[in-house]
Amino acid sequence: MKTQAKQVDTFGQLVGFCKSQGSMFNPSQDSMKIEALESLLQTAREKTEIMYNDHKAVTWAINQRRDALKHMQKIVTRAYNAAIATKMSPSLLEDLRNVKVKLTGNIRGKTSSPQADDPSQVKTGRGPIPQADVVSKMRNFTLFIKLLELHDGYTPNESEISIEGLKSLLEMIETSQVQLVTSQIKLNRSKEACRLVIQKEEGIYGLSKLIKVYVKSAFGVESDAFTSISKLKFVSR
């Protein structure tokens, strides 16, 4: 994105140069006239601003999803500890523990009599979370809740780890996932829109080359005018 912003700034310099020449800058092509150049510059600025806003939205959505998953890890550990206290059957508790391990990454040696785990020990890295891992965690969290529902004795007074509280958290994670995917799609579209306006032949990249050719022809290859704009670099990707 820095490349696009830099290209727009450089094109602004080129347009400023063209305007500074007054009536001497008089190309025959409508697309190269000052009004058209200013219009293209404004469009490029708007597209770049949209792209930056979409990038911020993606960053926000990533953080929201990461925080929701981090909270889920701690809540799952608390719910598991609560399940132990309800005298859940050993086989169901073992199934619950296996799912918990997948959700928290807290892999510890199996024992015939599982002990309560400490939620403060749950590892919650801040690195990027792979898409497949998120889908897997949502699937396992759903299974975790269903296993708890099989035990009639699981009725904690703490709302966060109640069945309804867990379902609400699952819905929050699912919503954050949808928001992230949606914002990523928007960002990809805005990036492409910027690329078309800035880095294609029909946009700033191609037009800047034509302007340089025109200035070389109108003012001469050794003129100060051509020397000034020849230093402005535009790239295509």
Image (cartoon, rainbow, N blue to C red):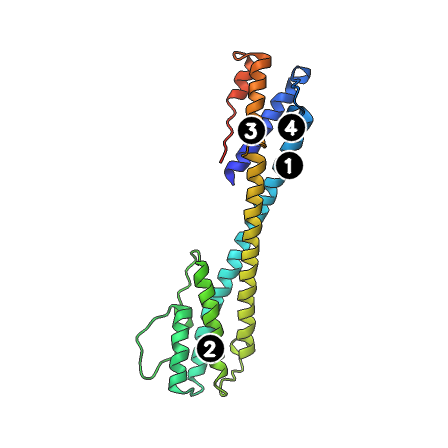
Quickly name the residue at label 3.
Answer: 206
Distance of label 2 from label 4 (alpha carbons): 62 Å
**Which is closer to the viewer, label 2 or label 4?**
4
Distance of label 4 from label 1 (alpha carbons): 10 Å
Distance of label 3 from label 2 (alpha carbons): 61 Å
**Which residue sits at x=56%, y=69%?**
171
- Left or right: residue 70 versus residue 55 is left
Task: Give the structural element (helix, strand or loop) at label 1.
Answer: helix
Task: Give the structural element (helix, strand or loop) at label 3.
Answer: helix
Quickly name the residue at label 2.
Answer: 79
Residue 223, quarter of the rendered image:
top right
**Which is closer to the viewer, label 3 or label 2?**
3
Residue 104, quarter of the rendered image:
bottom left
**Which residue sits at x=54%, y=65%?**
174
Task: Give the structural element (helix, strand or loop) at label 2.
Answer: helix
Q: Is residue 118 visible?
A: no
